[in-house]
Amino acid sequence: MTDAPSGKSKLPLHWKMVIGFMAGLVLGLIVHSTVGADAGWVKTLTGITQPAGNIFLRLIFMLVLPLLFSALVVGISEMGDVRSLGRIGWKTLGYTILASGIAVVLGLVLVNVLKPGTGTDPATAQQMLAAGADRAQAIISKGKDAPGGADMLLSIVPSNVVSAAADDQIMGVMFFALMVGVGVVLTRTEKTAVFRNAVEGLFEISMTLITLVIRLAPYAVFCFMFNLAALFGWDLLLKLGAYVGVVVLALAIHMFVVYSALLKWAGWSPVKWFGAVREVMVLSFSTASSNATLPTSLRVAEENLHLPRKVSRFVLTVGATANQNGTALFEGVTVLFLAQFFGVELSITQQLTVMFVCILGGIGTAGVPAGSLPVVALICGMVGVPPEGIGIILGVDRFLDMCRTTLNTTGDLVLSTLVSKGEKDEPDPDVVTA
């Protein structure tokens, strides 16, 4: 969703976030370099800015479950917008899971190899946790007490979805949403159509409220960055640069290596294919919105790629919500970066849990500015990483949002191309215009 200005405001939201980020960073660095974080008036000031930032987080947490549930149900049910979940529907679902899985694994491998969040003084990281001690310690305790092994697998299927929601058992809620989405697809009655419309209404309401909450982001960014810069100093800036570099590197590898390999397998020339879709890539990078790019994607799929309309219209419409490889990759990288930053060791089981939830999160994340951040915060809570840490990356999220949205929309067209393989009226790749 684009950040359209409201009222008399002429400054887009992402520029406000950049201003808040820079102002908080500069002031925090000045405080860190001159008086230090232990000064009495600095502690008083951070005692105000930290709760102010936490209000933003609480608003996000308040909306995340209805947003994820409705988005996932709608996303899965839209896969049955053709007469039934037949060959095209299952191929779409299979390729979506495959591409998202590759993206998340790629991101996790790069973070584990390059370790952009390591090297922070544990004592300094604990200072940040102390600013929100009650909530941080509760989350860390919950992460330590989280089930593992067979118990973790059993916890995916909740015995009571209401209690699962109350206990922030996100995988249980998402499993229930998946089951409901499949049930909507398989049950074609007037009553289920009414139910689906109601869930879509909940989805739209949730997106509207999230959009309103995100307008507070510039102020939250300032509060978080001031507190963090005052504590960490220049070390924070270096770690943030490493984080951005790893995210962009992972996105670029997935875009030009993984997608090229998939296109080659489908019998297409990657060079000609990317030349044909460059308009979509430029527009999606500029708007950071899959929904705003969808009409152009549909036109490019039919006019430049010459894909069958029955495939492109179905796959691209579903993909705008469900096939978000860039979002899934970003969420995995961010969770592990924050875990490294705060010195939280994640086991293989916990990292596999992150991977699984990120794949589902790529389907259930709404297309709103910073729409993946609630999922990141919730996953952090699941594995014992302080969710307050998302304040570190809010200021650079607009740029990363533009990058991952480009991967998302390009991935939708890759998905359409793969699903078109073997379908009737499949075009000859040689006719693609450069």
Image (cartoon, rainbow, N blue to C red):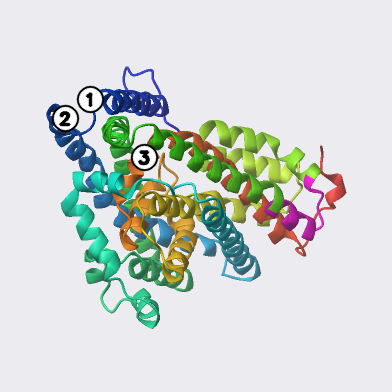
The tag on residue 39 is 2
Secondary structure state at the residue bearing disc 3: helix
Residue designated by label 1: 35
With 422 as the anchor, is 232 left or right in this view? left
With 75 as the anchor, is 319 left or right in this view? right
Secondary structure state at the residue bearing disc 2: loop
With 260 as the anchor, is 409 left or right in this view? left
| Residue 354 picture location, percent across and down | 44, 62
Q: CA distance from mark 2 to mark 1?
A: 6 Å
In the image, what residue type sits under mark 1? Val
Along the line of sight, the residue nearer the viewer: 69 or 117: 117
Residue drawn at 41 percent across, 67 percent down = 350
Along the line of sight, the residue nearer the viewer: 395 or 320: 395
Q: Would you call the spot at circle 2 few (<14 residues within 10 Å), some (14-19), or many (20 or more)?
A: few
Disc tally is 3
Camera sees residue 1: no
Residue drawn at 32 percent across, 75 percent down = 147
With 83 as the anchor, is 21 left or right in this view? left
In the image, what residue type sits under mark 2? Ala
Q: Earlier in the sequence, mark 1 or mark 3?
A: 1
Please report contact status of discs 1 and 3: CB closer than 8 Å, yes or no.
no
Verify whether residue 269 appears in magenta: yes
Q: CA distance from mark 1 to mark 3?
A: 22 Å
| Residue 83 picture location, percent across and down | 57, 66
Q: Which residues are magenta?
A: 258-270
Q: CA distance from mark 2 to mark 3?
A: 22 Å
Quarter of the image for the N terminus: give it.
top left
Along the line of sight, the residue nearer the viewer: 104 or 243: 243
Please report contact status of discs 2 and 1: CB closer than 8 Å, yes or no.
yes
